[in-house]
Image (cartoon, rainbow, N blue to C red):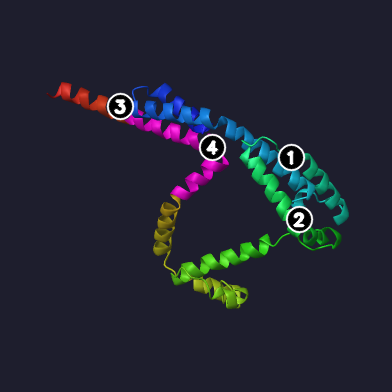
Amino acid sequence: MEVIAKGLHQILANVPESSYLQRLSKQVDRAVAMGRIQANDLKESHEWLQKIAACLRYPASKYPEQHVTGAQVAQEMELLQQQFQPKQRYRRPQMALCSNLQRLWNAYGEHLLPCYDIPGLPADNLRLESLFNRLRRHQRRISGRKSTRELREFGHFQVLFTAESQAELLEQIRQVPLPAYHEKRKQLEATEGTRKFFHRLHRDSEKAMQALVENYVGRCQEIATANHSKIEADRQHP
């Protein structure tokens, strides 16, 4: 929200006559002021979440040289829970994080610890779930059905290509006409435009807003230039 407010102020500095954006800027400034306390609370909650991840050495790729035992992790987690005791009732994110941490650790912490004692045992099944989700999306795309119940029985046997060699695979790909491929790619990019914009807005808010500001200011300049040229043409040829 702060980045959006900054972008709106930048637009108004270049195009001050936009009354709609002036009203929108005031609403965004009000929302930023009202949400600042909740944002700071959420930031502190995220810092505690990072401490929890560091205690669990998660993800493992971030701690390749550290070798700990399950007993050591359990001891560090107990100490962390003693330190993480939010008392202010208005700090809802921290209260929710603390409550869920205690509940999940008491329920599943004992089953998580063996991954630190057994080499090669992953701490989660995210890679397996990611593969299954890709299979589900592929199944929906090729069948047009929302239900993916068939994957429960056949998902672990599904393959994306049935070619037995690279030559056969290339032959299958070449059966698709190149103009049709480009047309479908353009349609896919058009449908993915909104999702990609929100993805960029969440990942790099400043860069996304700067691009919007530049496009808006450039469009306003084009319209102003076109109007000026039309006025000059009307003067020369009344």
For the residues marked 2 and 1, what is the alpha-carbon distance in whole angstroms?
16 Å
Q: Which labelled disc corresponds to residue 46?
A: none
Q: Which residue is depicted at the point 56% across and 71% down?
A: 160
At x 52% / y 30%, what residue is drawn?
A: 34
Q: Mark 2 or 1 closer to N-term? A: 1
Crowding at dot 3, Cα within 10 Å, few <14 / some 14-19 / many 20+, comes out as: few
- Residue type at mark 1: give it: Gln
Q: Which residues are magenta?
A: 194-222
Looking at marks 1 and 4 on the same chain, the residue that comes earlier in the sequence is marked by 1
Amino acid identity at mark 4 = Ser
Disc 1 from disc 3: Cα separation: 59 Å
Q: CA distance from mark 2 to mark 4?
A: 38 Å
In the image, taking residue 178 as reference, residue 65 lies left or right, namely right
Residue under pointer 4: 205
Read off the residue under disc 1: 85
Q: How far apart are the two marked residues, 1 and 4, measured between alpha carbons? A: 32 Å
Q: Which residue is mark 3?
A: 224
Q: Secondary structure at mark 1?
A: loop
For label 1, count other residues whose C-alpha is less than 10 Å away and answer few (under 14), some (14-19) or many (20+): few
